[in-house]
Image (spheres, rainbow, N blue to C red):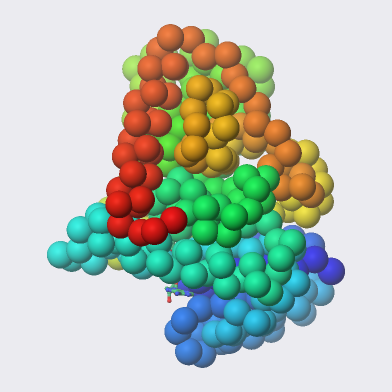
Amino acid sequence: MNKISIIGAGMTGATAAHWLAEREFADLVLVDVVEGMPQGKGLDLLEAMPVIGRDVNIVGSNDYSATHDSDIIIITAGIARKPGMSRDDLLKTNAEIVGAAATETLKHSPNAIYIILTNPLDTMAYLAMKKTGLPRERVIGQAGILDSARMRAFVAMETGVSVENIDCYVLGGHGDEMVPLTRHSNIAGVPLKEYIPADKLDAIVARTRKGGGEIVNLLKTGSAYYAPAAACAQMAEAILKDKHLIVPCAAYMNGEYGLNDMYFGVPVMLGRGGLERIIEYRLDDDEKAMFEKSAAAVKETHEALKSLVKI
Ligand code: APR
């Protein structure tokens, strides 16, 4: 059986375990700093397996040694921004948490592929790659599947068409400057622009860009976790089943799209080697301008990280 370890057993981590357990392709380990919590959630989920008929082993621990020989390490550990905390304070704290989680788990699982969820996503993936010294194939950030799924959900709500017929591609950094590519998005092969009136499509794009904030405002405490966790489960499945699935993810740029030494949301092929390929779309001038704006925002956070933490 494959083995997936999830670092951070909070809302996103535990929900990822739930989605993954249902898919029955890997045993699971939950690790968190809070004593008893990952053990309790792990045991509770394990006790659900007879009900849903899945043979999956699930354990919780406060110790990284439980993660030994993992095929995939998913990092969701981090803290949310607290009142009075600056963005830089949050960045520094989460960088310390993610940096330690990545380097410590690598000691126990030298062949693992990393999926990073902790925000700011692109920058935490960059940090994990630099701290571990792993090749870019083995450190991938989640975000594009989630942002695209939000757009797909909004298109389905607008049109009444099955979500299965709706393909949307949201690229760029995981922030307000993300790039929903309406020209490449379609409903059963029909471009969105031909299917949906321009004003309605603009509203969908705007809602997609603010999708994370919309959930935060509704929840009041905490941020989205069902959809981010589902996206992460899809990535893990594509990797371990060697599916060669093309999905948008945050990947280290090595000249693609004219970008270098940064993480950015682009279409990638996922298989047993992790990130197997980056697909480069031909962009028009408007799309290029959106990419540049989004890349500048991500670069700014990367630079802030470098001024706060030694990497
Ligand atoms: N090692 C392991 N776990 C840690 C550590 C650490 N050093 N520091 C914090 N944690 C744990 C917390 O104890 C908590 O259980 O990380 C967990 C985070 O869970 P939540 O607070 O519920 O946050 P969640 O909603 O899951 O979001 C986690 O994912 O989508 C992103 O923006 C989100 O960055 C955030 C992350």
In the image: residue 246, left or right of residue 291: right
Is residue 195 at all visible to an observer of this figure? Answer: no
Q: Say which residue appears at 59% left-offset and 19% top-offset.
A: 281
- Examine the rendered structure and indicate whether residue 60 appears above or below residue 227: below
Q: Position of residue 304 (x, y in %)?
A: 30, 48
- Examine the rendered structure and indicate whether residue 8 appears above or below residue 131: below
Quadrant housing the C terminus: bottom left
- Examine the rendered structure and indicate whether residue 218 appears above or below residue 99: above
Is residue 8 at all visible to an observer of this figure? Answer: yes
Q: Say which residue appears at 70% left-offset and 69% top-offset.
A: 109
Q: Say which residue appears at 39% left-offset and 23% top-offset.
A: 292
Q: Say which residue appears at 61% left-offset and 32% top-offset.
A: 267
Q: Residue furthest bottom?
A: 36
- Examine the rendered structure and indicate whether residue 45 appears above or below residue 164: below
Q: Nearer the viewer, residue 156 or 135?
A: 135
Indicate which quadrant contains ligand 1. Answer: bottom left
In the image: residue 244, left or right of residue 205: right
Q: Nearer the viewer, residue 134 or 281?
A: 134
Q: What is the tally of numbered marks visible in this picture? A: 0
Q: Residue furthest right?
A: 1
Q: Position of residue 301 (x, y in %)?
A: 33, 45
In the image: residue 103, left or right of residue 175: right
Q: Position of residue 143 (x, y in %)?
A: 51, 45
Quadrant housing the N terminus: bottom right
- Would you identify the image quadrant in which residue 240 lies? bottom right
Q: Position of residue 177 (x, y in %)?
A: 35, 32
Q: Residue furthest front?
A: 310
